[in-house]
Image: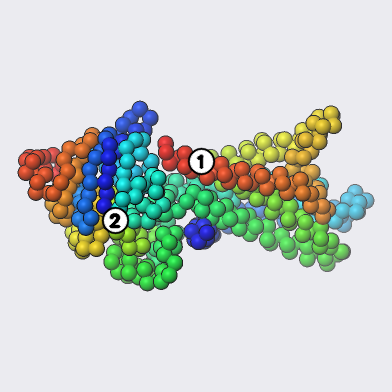
Amino acid sequence: MIETHQLTRRFGSRTAVEALTFSIPKGSIVGFLGPNGAGKSTTLKMLAGFLPPTSGTARVGGLDVVTDSLAARRLIGYMPESVPLHPEMRVREYLSFRAEIKGITRQRDAAVDRALELADVADVAARLIGELSKGYKQRVGLADALVARPPLLILDEPTEGLDPNQILRFRDMLKRLGAEHTIFLSTHIMQEVEAVCERVVIIHKGHIAASGPLEEVRAKMTGASATWS
Amino acid sequence: MRTAWAIYKRELIGTFCSPLAYVVMVAFLVFNGVVFWFFMSMTADNPALTGSRSPLQMFFGSTILSVLTLLVFSPATTMRTFAEERRSRTFETLFTAPVTDVEVVAGKYFGSMTFYAALWAPTLLYALVVKRYGPVDWGALASGYAGMLLIGSAFVALGVLMSAIARSQVVAYMLTFMAIGGVMFALGLGSYVFQEESTRQFFSYVNLWEHMEHFSVGLIDSRALVYYGSVSLCSLALATRTLAVRRES
């Protein structure tokens, strides 16, 4: 579903990520694990087609994210870190807008209803986004990522800032969604990866430290789990 | 096209759900109300001074006041377009959806044009006031509004460009103010400064004040159409390019 080759991003003289090469098979939940500042968000922004890479390539569903950007973006539901939303809009209104710009023309109401259900925000559909709690906002962001039924979900620190109960709820939701979507989620918490992911890509200081099925990586890097837990 | 329409609709929600829109509209109407009252009383008290001009003609042309209105209020219609998206970081969710830069710029531009037109709409009532006391030249009035829309379309396009460049709404306002005042308006002053005919003609071609004067008496000059049309298109093209460049840095 995702393939990167020598993916590099520089900001001026600073190198955020260098020569990332990894792949993520279809139909899996994959954790993108690394400490803060390791280059997780930069990588996800490149995959989502927001930030062009300095060099190297990234493909999503076989489509290059730079040369075939529009088609690649149609395959992705992206939820950025800290979930930026329009506070002056109502939840349903916002999701309907997002569905429309994602090209859902027919049965948009049904698509919005489905996303509201899946992300468990149907009860606040008529509320203003600006009035919602952090947990709800996070799930509205998830509903936005889901609304066009993309095969791939890219979630940047989806449980950041939630309380323990909300985290458990969110993880359950992700596991359910894993049946239908490939999910690539970033986190700096090892337990999160262990709780929901089948595979893991570990990034450290802009380089890939390990990548593969969770058990394999764990066996290879005994003791590493303590680093970020 | 459908995407641009969706962005346009969202732009209207964003604009008219914010108190800023109403502050701008009230300030605009207070200012222009005073200006119009001034012209009305001048026509009534001292007809010799105003000659054959109706208060409506003076409202659109003749004085510097209509230029001042545009200078102060049109940057306010565009300052939030991109600067606000960048501040609230919705810029990122917008551009990770399958939208093109052209669609986004088009949606934002027409959204701002609608706000700009909404500012002017209540001034149509001034014509009814004039009609109570004397004849109204409806043709000239239509041309006056056409002029305001045409000149406004160039200023709004410039404002969208500046909002794409700027990091905050205030900076976007100031940049647009400077572009309109320092470039578009100042260029026109050249036609009063230079004596030589060809130079004077060039500056007269870009003279905002002179254009307003023409529009206010019902004269729609194709040169003005071309001038403001090209300023709009160039600004919007640059805004599209700016978005791409800003993402790369």
Residue A47, how many percent across, how many down?
Answer: 32, 46
Residue position marked by numbered label 2 in the rendering: A152
Secondary structure of the residue carrying tag 2 is: strand
Residue B172, how many percent across, how many down?
Answer: 54, 42
Secondary structure of the residue carrying tag 1 is: helix
Q: Mark 2 lies on which chain?
A: A
Residue A70 falls left or right of residue A216: right
Q: How crowded is mark 1: few (under 14 residues within 10 Å), some or many (20 or more)?
A: some
Q: Which chain carries label 1?
A: B
Q: In which quarter of the image is residue B131?
A: bottom right
Q: Which of marks 2 and 1 is in front?
A: 2
Which residue occupies 78% across, 62% down? B127
Residue position marked by numbered label 1 in the rendering: B242
Which residue occupies 35% across, 46% down? A64
Real-space CA distance between mark 2 and mark 1, rounded to the nearest whole angstrom: 29 Å
Residue A102 falls left or right of residue B214: left
Residue B148, how many percent across, how many down?
Answer: 71, 52
Query: In the rendered structure, which amino acid carries the disc numbered 2?
Result: Leu
- Pick whichever, A178 or A88, lies toward us: A178
Image position of B14 with respect to B245: above or below: below
Which residue occupies 49% across, 45% down? B83
